[in-house]
Amino acid sequence: MTSGPVTVPFDARLAFATHNAHKAGEVRAILVAALPGFRAEHLVTSGEVDAPEPCEDGVSFEENALIKARALAAGTGLVAIADDSGITVDVMGGAPGIFSARWAGHHGDDAANLDLLLAQLADVRPNNRGAAFVCAAAAVHPDGREIVKVARLRGVIVGAPRGDNGFGYDPIFVADGQTVTNGELDPETKNAISHRGQAFRALAEDLPRLLDRP
């Protein structure tokens, strides 16, 4: 938990609970496109202000997103946003789910996570490799007002990584209606269809009332 207020840039209007530069770039681009007048410098991340990370002990994407946003709102005094996201594989009963980022045992080790998931699915036929990316996006005002939006992107897991774009499980996921993996999509196309893009665009519709804008 945060031990006290942290210093934030004077032009910051939103704090985003992430230390992941790739995710921060995606969300900045999504919000700049979705919120009229919003600029990239209006968003500061917890990594940029060195805010401590809370214990993510929720049992759902929604709970963990709110845990992160609540802690950052309390620590910065800003409206805080956060997401919790991951991949759910049908034949694995919805796993890795909320454990996606640390599926191989160490948080954020994308290569190890991919290798382990592919090994677990090695004997599963292509028509049984259905999966979904899930994102819960939360916004919390320091006064306690909260918003949560959830979005999903259905697709399938392919047999080997393809593409150098994106991050996480993107190189092994082909979304419904696509012929290439998320790792092969350009950033604009990925943001247009992704679970994170959907969730944060939905969140952006309600953010003005938390930012005290009409």
Image: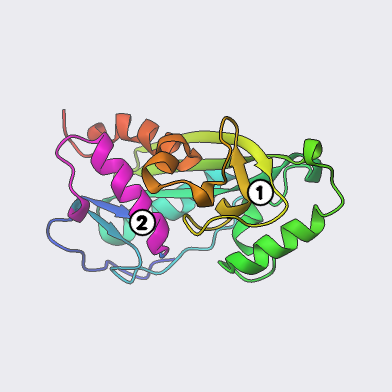
**Residue 185 x, y percent position in the rendering:** 47, 46
Q: Is 73 included in the stretch rendered in magenta?
A: no
* Amino acid type for the residue under numbered disc 2: Ala
Q: Is residue 214 visible?
A: yes
Label 1 crowding class (10 Å Cα cut-off): few <14, some 14-19, many 20+? many
Q: At 39% across and 47% down in the image, what residue appears? A: 187
Front-lying residue, 124 or 63? 124
State the mark number for residue 24: 2
Q: Tag 1's secondary structure?
A: helix
Query: Which of the numbered marks, if any, corresponds to residue 97?
Result: 1
Q: Which residues are magenta?
A: 20-41
Residue type at mark 1: give it.
Gly
Closer to us: 161 or 96: 161
Q: Is residue 103 left or right of residue 47?
A: right
* Residue found 63% across the figure and 64% down from its top: 102
Among the 4 quarters of the image, the one containing residue 21: bottom left
Instruction: Report how far apart the C-alphas of labels 2 and 1 lie in the structure.
Output: 21 Å
Residue in view at x 66 percent, y 48 percent:
97
Left of 54 or right of it: where is 94? right
Q: Main secondary structure of the magenta part?
A: helix
Coordinates of residue 208 in the picture (x, y in percent)? 23, 33
Of circles 2 and 1, the one toward us is 2
Identity of the residue furthest to the right in this view: 123
For the N terminus, which image quadrant? bottom left
> Is residue 36 in the magenta section?
yes
Tell me which residue sits at (16%, 27%) in the image. Answer: 214
The disc placed on residue 170 is: none
